[in-house]
Amino acid sequence: MKMNEFSDDLRLLTEEEMRSINGGESLWYWIAYGIGATGRFFYELWKFCEEHPFEVFNA
C-alpha cells in the first residue's frame, strides 16, 4: 500500500480529542511526570545502594 491511500483516513485531532487521549492533562504535564518519576527511581536506587552496599554485587 502506498501512503497516499491512507490520506483519506488520516485527520488532525481536535483539541478535545487530544485531551481525552491522555486523561485531560497536557503533554508538558506528562513529560514533567516522567522526569520526576525517573528522578525518584534513581534517588531510591541510590539510597538502597548506600544502605546495602555489597548485597547488590554479592547476590
Image (cartoon, grey):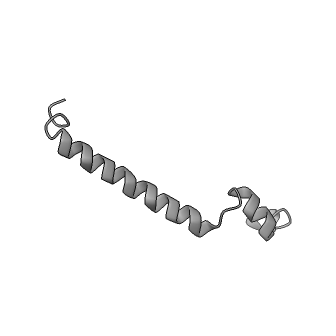
- The residue located at (32%, 48%) in the rendering is 44
Pinpoint residue 26: horizontal percent, then vertical percent: 65, 67
Q: Position of residue 48 (x, y in %)?
A: 25, 43
Indicate whether 15 appears above or below 22: below
| In-front residue for pair 9/55 | 55
Image position, residue 57 (x, y; %): 16, 37
Residue sitting at x 38%, y 54%: 40
Residue 5 seen in this snapshot: yes
* Quarter occupied by the N terminus: bottom right
Q: Is residue 4 left or right of residue 41?
A: right
State which quadrant residue 3 falls in: bottom right
Mark count: 0
Quadrant of res 55? top left
Residue 39: quadrant of the picture:
bottom left
Q: Quadrant of the C terminus?
A: top left
Q: Give whichever of 18, 5 is nearer the camera.
A: 18
Relative to residue 21, is residue 34 drawn left or right? Answer: left
- Farthest top residue in view: 59
Q: Is residue 13 visible?
A: no
**Front position in the image: 34 or 6:** 34
